[in-house]
Image (cartoon, rainbow, N blue to C red):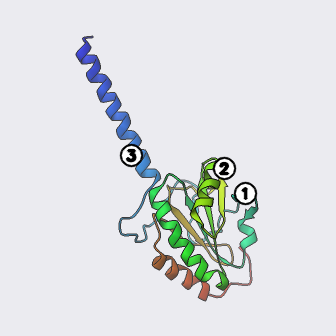
Amino acid sequence: MRPGVRSSIVERTIRTAALALLVAAMAACRSSPSGASVPAQPAGPGAPAAGMPAPEFRLLSTDQTEVGLPDLRGRVVLVTFWATWCGPCKQELPAIDSVYRRLRSSGFAVVGVDYREQGADVSSFAQRSGLSFPLLQDSTGEVAFRYRLPGVPASYLVDRDGLLRQIHVGPLSAKELTRMVDALLSAPATTGTP
């Protein structure tokens, strides 16, 4: 093979690999430019859907406290998946925190589940961010798998009875989150459990 042909093949291979990486990165960090609700796409067999019980989990927070979704039963809970490398995630977390600070005394809870990063990275981010809700470490991706996570950011709104009520892929605005949470806070909890 001539040297010029070989370098052309190498260049095309590099461009193809770079394009594949770009597409994968965009899929992993999906967002809606307007911040409007993006309907969640089915993420495979067993993917949770609105009306189903939220997949339960127990994870360590950045301060090494164990937090489990069952511990939050009786509250409206936002389970939001994020990562330190995801720009839209870092933009939405302060908006989520502002809603949490305003509505936590009304029965609203938030857990931020970091997607597959090491504890030191998550802890460092937690210290810098000043967020008031717990940031949990899903370093193995086990919880993300249970939720059939389509990408980050992705948020799952759970009612007081532990049922999924909203699935939102992409960044959430404070206004949109407030609207979603207010609707669930004003709804009475049922007496039974899922």
Is 24 located above or below residue 49 in the figure? Answer: above
Quadrant of image for the C terminus = bottom right
Mark sitting on residue 86: none
Q: Secondary structure at mark 3?
A: helix
First of labels 1, 3 by sequence position: 3
Please name the residue that numbered disc 3 is placed on.
23
Q: CA distance from mark 1 to mark 2?
A: 10 Å
* Quadrant in the picture for the N terminus: top left
Residue located 52% across and 69% down the image: 94
**Of the two numbered discs 1 and 3 in the rendering, the one whose residue sits closer to the viewer:** 1
Pointer 1 with pointer 2, Cβ within 8 A: yes
User: What residue sits right under mark 2 in the picture?
Assistant: 119
Q: Residue at x 45, y 60 (%)?
A: 88
Residue closest to the far top? 1
Q: Amino acid at mark 2?
A: Gly
- Residue at image mark 1: 60
**Amino acid at dot 1:** Leu
- The answer to whether residue 163 is above or below residue 40 is below
The residue under the point 41% across, 51% down is 26
- Rounded to the nearest angstrom, the CA distance separating label 1 from label 3 is 31 Å
Label 1: which secondary element: strand
